[in-house]
């Protein structure tokens, strides 16, 4: 990132211009998984964000950075800050503007048509053309394999792999079913997409995956076994 001078360390046979030096004044540098950056590196990046200057390895010359820094993470920065793994001063310098992207499961709950848009986009990238004829077939197979309410814990990357597997093997099993149900339950509660019937239906199904009998679920939920069966037979409705 910072570059180095020739001879700065073993193997530095020529000078190297880092990404901060190569970024033009109207450009931007994207730092992915910023939550995994070590504290010493955070300190070095803090200088760039605060002073807009940096020094290549083996040099005493301060260079100026004129671009922007955009960062992303799938971790909770608040939790990392509480554990002292993410510096407060770095956080406040980095997060002048922030955007939270909802997980794929929430996006599908709130806008079911987004699955079709993503399918066409991903298939087009894989095949080199719009692939509109493939999309309905792949969509039908996805729903058959993992269901309409699958939580997609791997988000878009998992969706890409699922599409690739379906094209190659006509099958995709998804992640562990109980974990999937738990993710659906938590996501539905967070997004407000579940009514009382849907909430009980999903919770009963999660318990049934673990304990396998209506009676065990009835005992834990204080419901009649026939009521448990009714909830287990319901399909979780998507939010419209």
Image (spheres, rainbow, N blue to C red):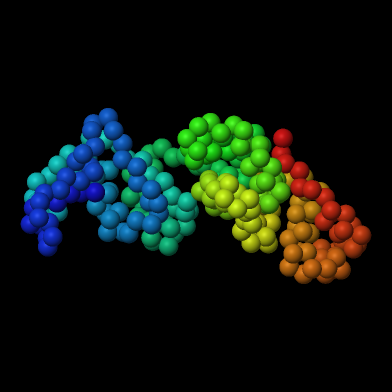
Judged left or right of residue 112, residue 47 is left
In this rendering, the count of numbered labels is 0
Residue at 21% in and 39% down: 22
Question: Looking at this view, is 9 or 183 the one in front?
Answer: 9
Q: Quadrant of residue 209?
A: bottom right
> Residue 35, relative to residue 25: is it above or below?
below
- Residue drawn at x 43%, y 58% is 80
Work out whether residue 149 or residue 93 is closer to the camera in this orientation and state it.
149
Residue 70 screen position, x and y as percent: 36, 40
Which residue is at the far front? Answer: 168
Say left or right for 103 vs 128. Answer: right
Instruction: Place residue 112 in its image quadrant.
Output: top right
Residue drawn at (27%, 59%) of the image: 40
Can you tell which quarter of the image residue 62 is in? top left
Q: Quadrant of the C terminus?
A: top right
Location of residue 136 in the rendering, given as x and y in whole percent from the top left corner: 66, 37
* Towards the viewer: 5 or 122: 122
Q: Position of residue 208 (x, y in %)?
A: 78, 64
């Amino acid at each position: 990132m910072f570059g180095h001078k020739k001879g700065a360390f073993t193997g530095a046979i020529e000078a190297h211009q880092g990404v901060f030096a190569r970024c033009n004044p109207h450009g931007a540098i994207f730092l992915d998984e910023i939550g995994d950056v070590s504290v010493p590196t955070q300190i070095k990046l803090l200088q760039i964000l605060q002073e807009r200057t940096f020094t290549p390895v083996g040099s005493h010359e301060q260079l100026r950075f004129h671009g922007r820094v955009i960062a992303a993470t799938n971790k909770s920065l608040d939790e990392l800050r509480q554990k002292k793994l993410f510096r407060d001063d770095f956080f406040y310098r980095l997060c002048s503007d922030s955007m939270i992207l909802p997980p794929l499961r929430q996006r599908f709950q709130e806008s079911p048509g987004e699955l079709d848009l993503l399918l066409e986009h991903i298939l087009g990238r894989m095949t080199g053309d719009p692939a509109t004829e493939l999309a309905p077939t792949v969509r039908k197979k996805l729903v058959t394999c993992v269901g309409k309410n699958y939580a997609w814990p791997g988000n878009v990357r998992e969706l890409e792999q699922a599409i690739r597997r379906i094209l190659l093997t006509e099958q995709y099993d998804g992640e562990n079913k109980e974990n999937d149900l738990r993710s659906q339950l938590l996501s539905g509660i967070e997004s407000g997409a579940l009514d009382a019937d849907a909430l009980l239906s999903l919770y009963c199904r999660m318990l049934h995956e673990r304990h396998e009998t209506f009676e065990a679920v009835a005992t834990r939920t204080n419901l009649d076994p026939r009521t448990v069966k009714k909830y287990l037979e319901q399909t979780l409705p998507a939010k419209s």
